[in-house]
Amino acid sequence: MSPRRVRRLGPYERPGGRGSSRPIEWVAGIDRKEHAPDGEWVVRHVSGATDRVYRCPGCEQEIRPGVPHVVSWPNWPGGAEERRHWHTACWRNRINRGPLRRRY
């Protein structure tokens, strides 16, 4: 009989870790405002439970159905018309993109 494997605890399950639950800003569907060098943004995490395929402006690759991602738009009147779907990692690294990449 082989020994039983121990399951590794996640960062929110560890005693003395990040806490007992995820931060509220990571809950899907809740809008929050982010201030960054490129402006003020409204950001929403979505579960990806749709049949649509989106194109990420950060990497210009497809965001397939079922992939959790970020929807963001500028925080100004009429900014919701400029809403874009981003991979979560691409959204976090948008400030580090080179000067030849488009803003959206």
Image (cartoon, rainbow, N blue to C red):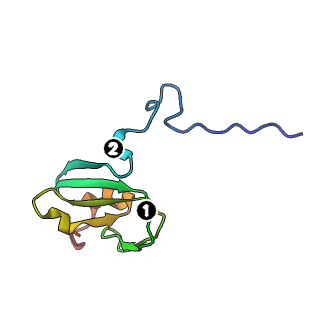
Element on which disc 1 rests: loop
Q: Quick check: 45 left or right of 82?
A: right
Front in this rendered view, residue 53 or 60: 53
Name the residue rendered at 49%, 35% in the picture: 12
Furthest residue in direction right, as rendered: 1
Please identify the quadrant where the N terminus is shown.
top right
Q: Earlier in the sequence, mark 1 or mark 2?
A: 2
Q: Mark 1: give few (<14), some (14-19) or many (20+) Cα within 10 Å.
A: some
Q: Quick check: 84 left or right of 61?
A: left
* Residue 49 percent coordinates (x, y): 45, 62
* Residue 39 percent coordinates (x, y): 15, 55
Q: Quick check: 96 left or right of 11?
A: left
Element on which disc 2 rests: helix
Furthest residue in direction left, as rendered: 77
Front in this rendered view, residue 103 or 99: 103
Q: Mark 2: give few (<14), some (14-19) or many (20+) Cα within 10 Å.
A: some
Q: Mark on residue 48? A: 1
Label 2, on which residue? 25
Measure the C-alpha gap from mark 1 to mark 2: 17 Å
Residue 47 occupies quadrant: bottom left
Give above or below for 103 relative to 36: below
Furthest residue in direction top, as rendered: 16
Give above or below for 15 relative to 43: above
Name the residue rendered at 31%, 49% in the picture: 30
Disc 2 residue type (three-letter): Glu
Please identify the quadrant where the C terminus is shown.
bottom left
